[in-house]
Structures are given as structure tokens and as C-alpha cells.
Amino acid sequence: MNLDILVRGGTVVDGTGGPGRRADVGVVGERIEAVGDLSAVEASSVALVLDARGRVVCPGFIDPHGHSDASLLIDGGMASHLRQGFTTQLSGNCGDSAAPVTDRNRDLVEASLRELPDGPTWQTFAEYLEAVDAQRLAINVALLVGHGTIRGAVMGPADRAPDEAELAAMRREVELAMAAGALGLSSGLIYAPGMHARPDEVAALVAAAAEAGGLYATHMRNEADGLFASLDESVAAVRAAGAGARLQVSHLKAASGPVHGRAAEAVAVLERARAEGLDVAADQYPYTAAATVLATVLPPEVLAAPTPEVVAALRDPATRRGIRTTMEAGRSGWENVAADPGWDGIVVSWSGSRPEWAGRSLGDLGRELDRDPADLAFDVLADDALETDCVIECMTEADVEAILAVPWIAICTDAEARRPGHPILDAGVPHPRTYGTTARVLGRYVRERRVLSLEGAIAKLTSVPAARLRLKDRGVVRQGAFADLVLLDPETVADAATYPDPARYPVGIEAVVVNGTPAVVDGEETGLRSGQLLRGR
């Protein structure tokens, strides 16, 4: 047997959820040639032999919810994902994709791609995919098209229902993106302009994606006090969309005091939909803090205008008083994070105008500067043209574990790929999920807290998202599958990333093979890149 790679002596946990077994793995080209006893193979005849004694060999991890739309064009090495063992990532989530681009949404897209020095050089989703395909990628990538981006391309920031022609134009953009290779449609109903969509609009676009076999992944309208109404809305969208519609609830959580302790009830809502025969699932990141844009502190009506007008409004004292009044009074359906968890729970993670604020809570900054934290938020949002990022402490450990224990809920990062020390991709103080997600699951929640088995955790990182994204021959270790492999030490694997110091690679992930090419060996990047753009079919 002539092999390119031989992984010898390990315990193969194949991604199906079944028990691990002692086996060797042989790779030829980009596929797995054999799994079993390969002791007869002479090591000297193999280009690379990986000693897996005392180690686990498993499929490459698949991130079903990422945000590397811009960063993969800056550094195709995607180091923070690769070093966690990810061999595939799905981006274009939360209603925010890099295309289509028109005069009506160019400012929105440019803001979401702020890391790109020249902004978008494409207009259509197909042209964006060509730009991605031209990159030297270390891992595989797939893309969703964003409802918010499409709505902005057709309607701008308007807070109203589309007319017949506008809805037809939005459907056409979904159809074009699916034909180009999108895996489906995402929505971010907490973000402008997606937040202005009514349920019938969303259902119509979900149907357009479903007709081409696409997934619908949603960052729901409210993950806090309105969690259960938003779950009902999400399930109703796929029910209304009709045959073939598939729902993925993004980063399922219970994100405010009134719903703390109710994660199992949230899971039960989706379980009931599944029992009815609806194609419904979810994903989750294993942390008690979320990360998002600081503009979510603003009421929806403030965001129903072009960015320059919103910035001007934030500089107006009367507008500020009105926003404060709304924050204090609250409003049904709006996720009012200024009230819960409050300013002490909102930590700036990136600011162009105030980089020194990164890692500091607005509550702490307010006390230090003797300022109202709301005013500080309005100031930095205005000076950053709304592009301030933050981390929000909003969940309980018990709720995280309740969701994590569910076998059909995949693990995600909800993060872009970054690199320590990079002049662009190491800015600010990002959420530690960027670097630590997989190892946190395997170390903290498998080995230490025993929330789930090693085999169950690996399935949630591999075959579960692979099936959800309809990725053929990925997410499993078997003959004929793509040779996306991870070699890890189950006794030492652990996340090193922390909230104050997140840009730290995990320990215990020793080798990563992508499409039959060794991308990480002995815990270090090889510089070899064989990732592919995975287009929908």
C-alpha cells in the first residue's frame, strides 16, 4: 500500500458518536485510503508518519457559524481556526454577507468589511465567491448569503415592508447567490437593516433558498426576554416557507435574567418542531458571554436611517435623552442589553476611535471618567461610525451546559479567523471563543465537568455540522472520506484563551490535516494550504 500520510497507533474517534477504537489511518491524495491495522506498511515508504500513540484521531472540526468573510481575504491561513482543529468554516452568518453590493448598501458592506483596505472589489455574490476561490486557504470555507445584506442592497436602511417589486428583487438575489454556490440564507433580525423585516418577508426568502436546497440560519430577533417568541417566529418561518425549508438557530442561548434557567425549555421548543417533522436544529458556543456590535444598545427606530444620519442623531442631546428614556422603559421585542446585563456587563472589544478602551466595561469606564456610561456609548458609536464591537456577559453556566448536552446541537465559534501579532487581525480584545472554542469543549466540558462524552463532543464538532451543511464525505473518519483529520491529546487538550488575553492558541491539538495535506504538525503550522471553497449544490 502506497500512502502519503500514515497516522499510526491512535484511538480513532470517527465522528459518528460511536466508541473509539485502536486503528491506523492511511491517506492517499486528499482522501482516506484505509482505516484499520496498517502495521504492515513500512514507515520508510510514507512521506509523513504521525505517531498517534496515546492520542485521539478524529475528523477535522467543522464550524457552522463563523464570520471570516473579510479576514480570509487578508490571511487565508485562518490561523485561529486551524490551530483549534477546524478544517472547515461556514461564514456569511447573522444576515451579514460580503455581497451583493449596490449603491444602497455599499456603506453597510464596507463597514462589515472594514479590515479590507480597499473594501469590496465585487458586486455580485458570484464575484465575491470568485475572490474567495482565488485565495490560498488553509481550511475549507463555505458561505451563506445574508438577508440583511440583500435587504440593504434593495431597500437601503428603510423600516418598512417591501413592495412587490422589492420583494421580487430580494428573492432574485437569493436565487442568484444559491446558483453561485451559497449554502443557504442567514438572517440577523437583531441587526439593522434585517431587524426591520416582517415575518412574511423572511419566509418568502427562506422559501427561495429552500427551493435550491439551502439552509436558513438565523440570529433570532431576541435571545433575551423575547427568546421564546423569537423561537416561535423562527420555527414559523420554515413552516411557512414550505417543503424543503431547513432551520438552523444560530448560537442558541438564554441571554437575560428573565430567561436564565430556561435553556432546557428553549431546546424543548425545537424538539417539538422536530417531532412535528420540521427540519430544525441549532448551534452553540461554549461560553457565558456573547459578542456583537455595540450598536445593538440603540432602539430599532434609531437605526432606520443611513449611518451618517444615525451618527448625527447620536450627537444630538435631545436624541440621547430619548434613547435613554427608551432604555429605561424597555420595549417588547427589543433586546435591551443596556438594561440587562447593564453597562458593567458590556465590555468594549474593538474601537477605532478609542483603542485603549478595548477590554474595559462601559460601567468601569463611566466610573473612571465620571461620565454616564450611556453617554460614553453614544460618543464612541458616533466617533466609530457605529462600528464599535463589544463582549456582553449575559448567560449562566447551567444554561450553557444544558444546551451543550444536546447531541443534535452543533458547536460553533461565532468568530472570524484571526492571527496573533497580525497588524490587522490582532486588533482589539476579541471574545476568547475566537481561539479556544474546541479545546474548551474537549477540556473543560468533557474531561473536567463530564457534561458530555468525548465521542459525543467530537460528533457535535464534526458529523453533526457536516450533515447540517450537507457536506458529503466530511465530518467522519472512514475509507473514501476527505482526509480532514485532527490528532489531539485527550489528557491535556485545553483552551488557553481568556477574556483579558484571548489571542492564545489552545494546547493539546498536535496535528491537523486538511484535504490530505498536513497543515499543522507538532503543534505548528506547516505553511501548506489546501483548503477549498465548498460551493452548494
Image (cartoon, helix red, strand yellow):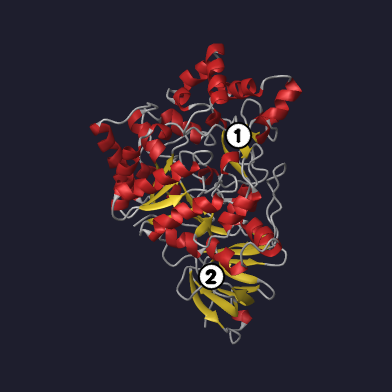
Mark 2: few/some/many CA within 10 Å (<14, 14-19, 20+): many
Q: Quadrant of residue 160?
A: top left
Q: In this figure, which residue is indicated by the disc labeled 1?
A: 340
Using the rendered image of the protein, determine whether residue 242 is visible from the camera's viewpoint.
yes
Residue lying furthest right: 368
Mark 1 belongs to which amino acid? Asp
Using the rendered image of the protein, determine whether residue 122 is visible from the camera's viewpoint.
no
Q: CA distance from mark 1 to mark 2?
A: 38 Å
Badge 1 marks a residue whose secondary structure is loop
Q: Quadrant of residue 439?
A: bottom right
Residue drawn 52% across the image and 48% down it: 251
Q: Mark 1 or mark 2: which is in front?
A: 1
Residue drawn 53% across the image and 17% down it: 322
Mark 2 belongs to which amino acid? Gly
**Foreground: 130 or 277?**
277
Q: Earlier in the sequence, mark 1 or mark 2?
A: 2
Q: In this figure, which residue is indicated by the disc labeled 2?
A: 17
On the image, the x and y values in percent for residue 460 come to 53, 61
Looking at the image, residue 112 sits to the left or right of residue 39; the answer is left
Residue drawn 56% across the image and 17% down it: 320
Badge 2 marks a residue whose secondary structure is loop
